[in-house]
Image (cartoon, helix red, strand yellow):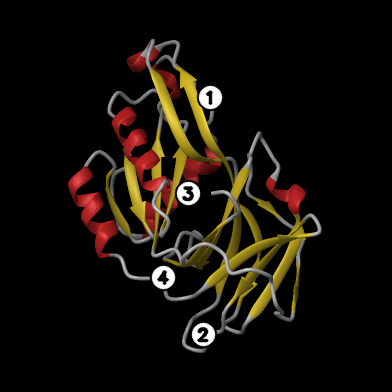
């Protein structure tokens, strides 16, 4: 799947209805593979994080272990490229699974529960407030003003909220991987320039590849579009 661009037009911010869930203080992207023997424990950890109100945990399955005897049923080459872009941006010289990326700037082994839990616990609120709600079958994204911030990209991230997978071959043959918030794509909504901005797009944009939920990321533009995440919001029910 290639990164797709969602059609959206920025409009002036206005009341978006009831206040959403508590602000997201950190985003954890767990890069994982069904062909990786060390990943199942990290998948469970991502599931635990997904239940924390102030934390956005995303499972991002990659393809580069498919040659070991089992093709990951949820992985996309675009996710490989996202992990690689993080490595380049953060001068990290090795791709591996499980690997956790915290708010786009900390890359650590996804199996290191104590270190990852500490990083998450120490994370303060993301610097830019992002709110999301739904109205008339449209997704409404509001981003607050911040005159000190550099331009950043807004991404809609469709997810499957829960998905068990029975693994038929390879290192995890016969085992069941249980995923939370499995990413099904990254869709660029537009660019935020620091002014208070609203974007609206069709709810259908998030209904792809079995997705039943979504999140929104506000991510600084690095050379490979994998900079620091400066804002995030969970969609309804996430």
Q: Secondary structure at mark 2?
A: loop
Label whose residue precedes the other's in the sequence (1 or 3): 1
**Residues under labels 1 and 3: Cα distance?**
18 Å
Residue 97 seen in render? no
- Where is mark 4, residue-wise? 126
Residue 79 seen in render? yes
In the shown orientation, is residue 126 left or right of residue 161? Answer: left
Q: Secondary structure at mark 3?
A: helix
Query: In the current view of this chain or complex, which residue is farthest to the front?
Result: 18
Asked if disc 1 and disc 4 are in contact, CB closer than 8 Å, the reply is no
**Residues under labels 1 and 4: Cα distance?**
32 Å
Residue in the image at 74% along x and 65% along y: 200
Residue 82 bears which disc, if any?
Answer: 3
- For the image, the number of numbered tags is 4
- Camera-nearest label, 3 or 2: 2
Q: What x and y, as percent, mark residue 1? A: 63, 39
Label whose residue precedes the other's in the sequence (1 or 2): 1
- Camera-nearest label, 1 or 4: 4
- Camera-nearest label, 1 or 2: 2
Residue 73 bears which disc, if any?
Answer: 1
Residue 102 bears which disc, if any?
Answer: none
- Where is mark 2, residue-wise? 146
Residue in the image at 33% along x and 16% along y: 171
**Residues under labels 3 and 2: Cα distance?**
26 Å
Asked if disc 3 and disc 2 are in contact, CB closer than 8 Å, the reply is no
Asked if disc 1 and disc 2 are in contact, CB closer than 8 Å, the reply is no
Location of residue 54 (image quadrant): bottom left
């Amino acid at each position: 799947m290639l990164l797709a661009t969602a059609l959206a037009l920025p409009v002036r911010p206005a009341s978006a209805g009831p206040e959403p869930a508590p602000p997201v203080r950190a985003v954890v992207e767990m890069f994982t593979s069904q062909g990786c023997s060390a990943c199942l424990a990290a998948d469970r950890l991502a599931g635990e994080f997904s239940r924390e109100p102030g934390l956005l945990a995303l499972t991002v399955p990659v393809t580069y272990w498919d040659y070991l005897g089992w093709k990951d049923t949820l992985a996309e080459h675009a996710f490989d490229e996202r992990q690689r872009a993080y490595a380049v941006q953060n001068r990290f010289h090795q791709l591996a699974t499980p690997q956790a990326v915290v708010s786009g700037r900390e890359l650590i082994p996804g199996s290191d529960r104590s270190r990852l839990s500490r990083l998450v616990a120490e994370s303060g609120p993301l610097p830019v407030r992002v709110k999301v709600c739904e109205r008339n079958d449209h997704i409404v994204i509001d981003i607050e003003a911040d005159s000190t911030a550099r331009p950043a990209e807004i991404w809609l991230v469709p997810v499957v909220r829960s998905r068990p997978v029975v693994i038929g071959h390879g290192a995890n043959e016969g085992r069941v991987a249980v995923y939370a918030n499995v990413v099904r794509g990254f869709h660029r909504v537009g660019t935020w320039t620091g002014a208070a901005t609203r974007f609206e797009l069709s709810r259908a944009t998030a209904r792809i590849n079995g997705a039943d939920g979504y999140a929104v990321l506000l991510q600084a533009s690095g050379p490979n579009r994998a900079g620091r995440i400066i804002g995030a919001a969970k969609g309804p029910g996430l």
